[in-house]
Image (cartoon, helix red, strand yellow):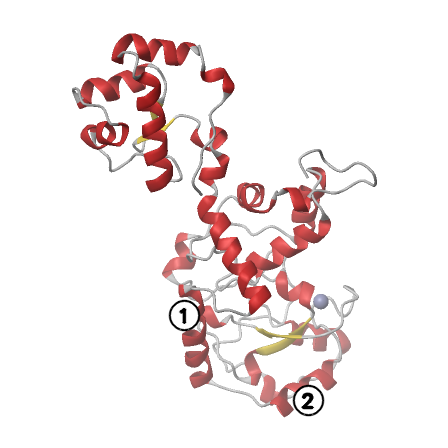
Amino acid sequence: MDDLRIKFSIIGHPKLEKLKLIVGNQAFELLVTLWIRVAQNRPHGNLKELDNVDIALYAGWKGDPEEFVEALKKCKWIKDNGNGLEIQDWREHQPWVFFAPERSERARQAAHAKWGTKPQRAAQKTRSERMRVAKSKGNHTKAEWEEMMIFFGVCVKCEGESGLVCCDRDHIIPVYQGGSHGINNIQPLCAKCNASKGPDNTDYRLLFCEKRGIEMPAKWMQPAGISLALTSAPSPNPSPNPKPTPKAKKNKKFIPPKLKDVIQFFTENKYTEESAIQAFKYYADGDPPWTDSRGNQVRGWKQKMRGVWFKPENIIKKKGNTPPWL
Ligand SMILES: [Zn+2]
């Protein structure tokens, strides 16, 4: 990323003319210098932690820093968002810069998928570390897994309704919540149910057996105290989370979208269903789910999708009507 956007309309724009009246004819150069430094150092356009002197240095202003920052505020080039200063409407005017961090995250993922190179993800490390801990609590063999597959035969959640070939090994209590890798914490789910599971610790094997009036082999039962009263029908939002980790607690307000919501959001905005599914899987399969490569919780998923996934190659293409920018 080594460029930024400047609108044609800046020439003669009242905001610029006003700034010229205060700081002189160098106003334009000062602004562009400020933007470039912000783009290089603070792609999200926020200036918090910077004081007036820093801002003046960014812009190359040689006069009184306080006067300069006041002038920028007065002319509405920067504003206080209650949490510190930021460049006004930065995201709207500089989307290329704003989403640069997410783009490079995506590029790393794409390179990983294409070339099998290891993405530099801290999450990757913690994932294997967590798995090591999970295995120390309990492990299972291939034969045990196959035995379970034969017993259930389908995804125990949708019971084959998704039409997808079963099955993924799902950790009933996710590994990141301290679940073990033992067979009693494993259930067969199809890819769709697995991807949309979210913070749901339901033991669908028990529901499956209860519906059919069959006994689940005792060796697959969760040890007492870990199984979470799951013999009743699932409520619309079953998440009996015994001990939320501090992280889960902090992020409890985030409700992950369903696949169909994401597809709807994409197609309403004229982006393909395939890209919606790809995006959904990327975040739903995260560890923990719905975190980005830096391990930060995705908060506004629509914003994330817009910023990272709404790109020209994902636009629905009509025959003979290629968008002019492709
Ligand atoms: Zn399923």
Residue lying furthest top in this view?
21
Image quarter where the C terminus lies is top right
Please indicate whether residue 172 sits to the left or right of residue 56 in the image. right
The disc placed on residue 147 is 2
x and y percentages locating residue 23 in the rendered image:
26, 13
**Rendering coords of residue 127 (x, y %):** 45, 71
Determine which quarter of the picture holds residue 141. Answer: bottom right
- Would you say the beta carbon of the disc 1 residue lies within 8 angstroms of ligand 1? no
Taking the image in four quarters, ligand 1 sits in the one at: bottom right
Q: Residues within 10 Å of mark 2 (few under 14, many from 20)?
A: few
Q: Amino acid at mark 2?
A: Glu
Q: Earlier in the sequence, mark 2 or mark 1?
A: 1
Query: In the rendered image, is residue 298 in sight?
Result: no
- Circle 1 sits on which residue? 126
Q: Is residue 263 left or right of residue 284?
A: right
Q: Quadrant of residue 3?
A: top left
Q: Is residue 185 visible?
A: yes
Query: Which residue is found at the position 46% from the left and 83% from the top?
Result: 135
Q: 24 or 48, which lies in front?
A: 24
Between residue 288 and residue 93, name the one nearer to us: 93
The one of 186 and 289 positioned closer to us in this rendering = 289
C-alpha gap between disc 2 and disc 1: 30 Å
* Residue 244 pos. (x, y %): 42, 62
Q: Secondary structure at mark 1?
A: helix
Q: Nearer the viewer, mark 2 or mark 1?
A: 1
**SS category of the residue bearing label 2:** helix
107 horizontally vs 277: left or right: left
Residue drawn 44% across and 10% down? 12
